[in-house]
Amino acid sequence: MPSYTAPIKDMQFILHDWLRVSEQDVPGYEDMDRDFTSAVLEEAGKVASEVLMPLNEVGDREGCVLENGVVRTPTGFKDAFQQMKDGGWTAMDCDPDFGGAGLPYLMHTAAQEPFVSANMAFNMYQGLTHGAYSAIYAHGSDAQKQTYLPKMTTCEWTGTMNLTEPHCGTDLGLMRTKAEPQDDGSFAITGQKIFISAGDHDLADNIIHLVLAKIPGGPEGIKGVSLFIVPKIMVNEDGALGDPNSLSVGKIEEKMGIHGNSTCVMNYDGATGFLVGEEHKGMRAMFTMMNEARMGVGLQGYAQAEVAYQNAVIYANDRLQGRDVTGDKNPDGPADPLIVHPDIRRNLMEQKSFLEGARALTYWGSSLIDRSHRLDDKEADGLVSLMTPVVKGFLTDKGFEYAVAAQQVYGGHGYIEEWGMSQFARDARIAMIYEGANGVQALDLVGRKLSQDGGKHVMAFFEMVKTFIKENDGNAALKADFLDPLKAASKDLQAAGMYFMQNGVKDPNHALAGSYDFMHMMGHVCFGYVWANMAKSAMEALEGGASDTAFYETKIATGRYYMARQLPATGMHLARINTGADTVMALEADQF
Amino acid sequence: MPSYTAPIKDMQFILHDWLRVSEQDVPGYEDMDRDFTSAVLEEAGKVASEVLMPLNEVGDREGCVLENGVVRTPTGFKDAFQQMKDGGWTAMDCDPDFGGAGLPYLMHTAAQEPFVSANMAFNMYQGLTHGAYSAIYAHGSDAQKQTYLPKMTTCEWTGTMNLTEPHCGTDLGLMRTKAEPQDDGSFAITGQKIFISAGDHDLADNIIHLVLAKIPGGPEGIKGVSLFIVPKIMVNEDGALGDPNSLSVGKIEEKMGIHGNSTCVMNYDGATGFLVGEEHKGMRAMFTMMNEARMGVGLQGYAQAEVAYQNAVIYANDRLQGRDVTGDKNPDGPADPLIVHPDIRRNLMEQKSFLEGARALTYWGSSLIDRSHRLDDKEADGLVSLMTPVVKGFLTDKGFEYAVAAQQVYGGHGYIEEWGMSQFARDARIAMIYEGANGVQALDLVGRKLSQDGGKHVMAFFEMVKTFIKENDGNAALKADFLDPLKAASKDLQAAGMYFMQNGVKDPNHALAGSYDFMHMMGHVCFGYVWANMAKSAMEALEGGASDTAFYETKIATGRYYMARQLPATGMHLARINTGADTVMALEADQF
């Protein structure tokens, strides 16, 4: 059975050695000192290891069952969910006015990681609720907030997001679900929604569905979409639960993974819905929480790779197979542990250098969200908007790739469900698809974000990288291993942007054909940037006489691996981008 | 439900336009003219589409069940297996002395592909039998051949390979299963073997297990391993079936995929076994059929990607979502088909250019095996030995990658089992692991094959590429798009080999840390070589006035994609290799 231990030291390193959060001017950060974050993360790690991890395999094996119209979650989920509520884990960054703890989003992000690593499917029940909370919080009326948010903060009521329909996912303008105005100001919602995560279950007293639908007579396409609150059970004026709403679960989908989460087909048959925000402005409401939601999916990507990595390391140290070619490392045993072999090392270093970079990037992105929300910092908001598709697309692609790589360390046992490595890969797979498939992320990045506000944000990104390199130019320890590769990679990225500018005007396909490569390339540059920063912080800690030298040296060595062996990918991506759309679009549709 | 159509034209193109098989001097090839191979492949494709494909999902869903010590295969497998026997598909390249058709291995390879695409798990029952047949054919006594081969040729009896034990897979020297000599010349086999594909089932009257075991008192480690025939049911002198042998199925493993194949734990409790070949020479017997077996697994890799690709193309043409940025392609419909989008194109072109290159490489490798066996061509044998780890490792890594990429085209539906795309990815995953995990293939390539016979074979490989480039240097149509990129990629590969030579001597880890990159790099160069060859053949066909111009133009365009967008990967791999072992081996085992 796989195990999980929250990587507290790595988390603390990012928060305090690199980001120095408690010194930042963001309201709420002043309380995030080492002791506080350590206490929170230790406790989250404990819940993850002891409560959620043991249920991960149970959830995968049992899945969710639809019986007489009601969904039953796997054994143990109910108790565990109650523990999450009791521990206040569902309310960490919610507004104190609605029962939340009001902590920064960064603290929420950091505390979420262990839960996601230990049991991604389980954690989605609260994750979706958090998303629905955010949408109502940002766009709901005061009355709606009073009615729903206190219960959603505690997860007494959970939430869902209803966007996809059988014939449309990415292209929501094709939506057919309709919302007909009623005399009492409510709407009658009718239609079918699919892929509704946590669509029904037995973990909460009520489920607050957020449903996108079209009000008849409104604008065509995406501009005619509105957002509605559609409770599973109607809420009376006094806040008590009333009659069931006119909605039902059509079926639970059989999926490749995340079996512990109920992915439902939801049928709305004239269900009572309440408009959130303005009519026809539903997509805007969705977009305001998209950065957070996509950042959260990026976190899922690396969090699954993290737990897979941890178990691969254990196996590589335990499993005796073959001998170190440079001399026996376990001469008294029948063979050396797998970890002596260079290709196993290469594999583990790939994973490790990715994971620590991914965590740093996600934390940093979360801190930008805090700056945006708590300081109304427009630059931070622009930067995080730019980076969001990179975090979502790159971290989930790579997260899956490395969950598969960790599985590979187990050889044949990696393919046997009993060992748990298959589940990590199968669960991680969904993160590349939902919340905007990764191809759509690439399109968002290249087709929208690069040119947003006149290209201001991407220029700020390059400026930030350049400034960092310049400011540390005299740092010899940093220069050859970190700054020079970062400079080269950043140059490649700029060249790609230049190619898009020069060629995308005459044919946008020249840019779009390179969008996926650009997303990965920018991922590598972001990683180069965070690794150079972390290496600098680790060197400073060592210079400052930090006692845990092994930890800081490991950090620097891991960063060196990334710079030396991962960053060269930018050259390949640039070469691909520079070929434009010619070979990509050469065939007619019927020639495939 | 996914569908499958054998890509006959692509297959025929490789056999006849490129390889011109019927003009080759290999005995048996003279009969492989266009009509003959077309008839065989059409018929194989029909069986694959109509008989095997409909059972693929059934096998995945039902899996195999162990009841009262006997394994039951999924619904329909028995009838389908009978059809495979009746059609002679199990005997194609077997020796006519034992009831086979005596066709070249290349014909066998080509005919296998549709079966593997349509139902990989099902096809393993005959695939394993073929492997066991080959081992007995090469190393068994005349009496053993007479007793077992006629029944194995027809799959009346199937075969298995028993290598792995719970504590050892790659490192078979640690094996514990013992074979104690008996007075009658047989051996009593005792031990546990795991991951035994097709270990038990209800498709055949008998199962001939090939078991590796150690004769007590023999040499230590891998040099003391012998190979034994251990029938499930003893065969009497008259050839009739006798008593059951002392062996049993411990359990069926729950796996990530290939559920239709029974992966068994096999317990041998003093089972009667018969030595194959010489004592302690069991590994040699295994190695003689390894090129074929690994080539077959490489085929599995791309064959799964092929069926996944076919369905992705159908979906990309059917699914309406979004609009072509350069102008509506389906103005009367609510949206354009997915295939208009450049990133969908990129994804499909990656898959297509991989698949056609993989098929070409596998056919070519199979033709080298024929040259080796039928002409005793040592150079062909050396070349195929060199390329075998590349075919196995690169084709299965990429095959899985592209099965996942095809799944991605489906968006959320790709994650739902009902659509079948998840199964292709899950089934393809095993090919990266079994028959030597891909890290072991890389080790074999760099640690053994490069220096084999004084480096003769790798030098012959480079010479072959160089000669092709030189001979076609005046071909302007070929030069810029094919020869120049091939030259550059080949130069990168040579530079990597040079790095290994210069640095591997003082520390072998400098070579081994780059072994995986080298395997992929060599895969790309092999693809560059086969694509340049295919492009040349297609150009010649067009110049010769071939009527199906669209087909040949598509072939060239697909090749151009590979050269422009896939070959640049060699530069990245070289950059990684050139960093040596320093960053890879920087950490102590406890620093992970």
Image (cartoon, coloured by chain):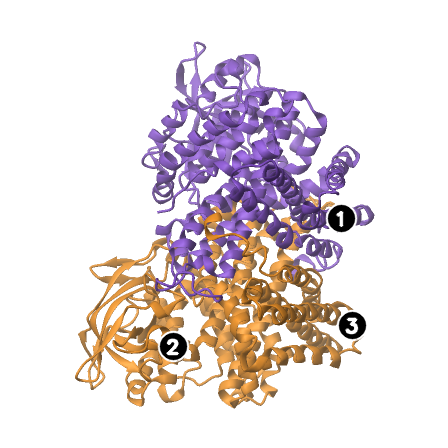
Chain colours: A orange, B purple
Which residue position holds label 3?
A: A477
**Side of B319 relative to B482 (left or right):** left
Please tell me whether mark 2 sits on a helix, a strand or a loop: helix
Q: Residues within 10 Å of mark 2 (few under 14, many from 20)?
A: some
Which residue position holds label 2?
A: A283
Q: Residue at x 48, y 29 (%)?
A: B38
Coordinates of residue A62 in the picture (x, y in percent): 34, 55
B124 relative to A431, above or below: above
Residue lying at the far front of the rendered structure: B545
- Same chain check for tags 2 and 3: yes
| CB-based contact (under 8 Å), mark 1 and mark 3 | no
A309 relative to A97, above or below: above
Tell me which corner region of the image, top left, top right, bottom left or bottom right, holds residue B292. top right
Tell me which corner region of the image, top left, top right, bottom left or bottom right, holds residue B182. top right
Earlier sequence position, callout 2 versus callout 3? 2
**Side of A140 relative to B116 (left or right):** left
Q: Is residue A86 visible?
A: no
Which residue position holds label 1?
A: B491
Residue type highlighted by circle 2: Met
Instruction: Find the distance from the CA under tag 1 to the CA under tag 3.
Output: 33 Å
Please tell me whether mark 3 sits on a helix, a strand or a loop: helix
Instruction: Find the distance from the CA under tag 2 to the CA under tag 3.
Output: 48 Å
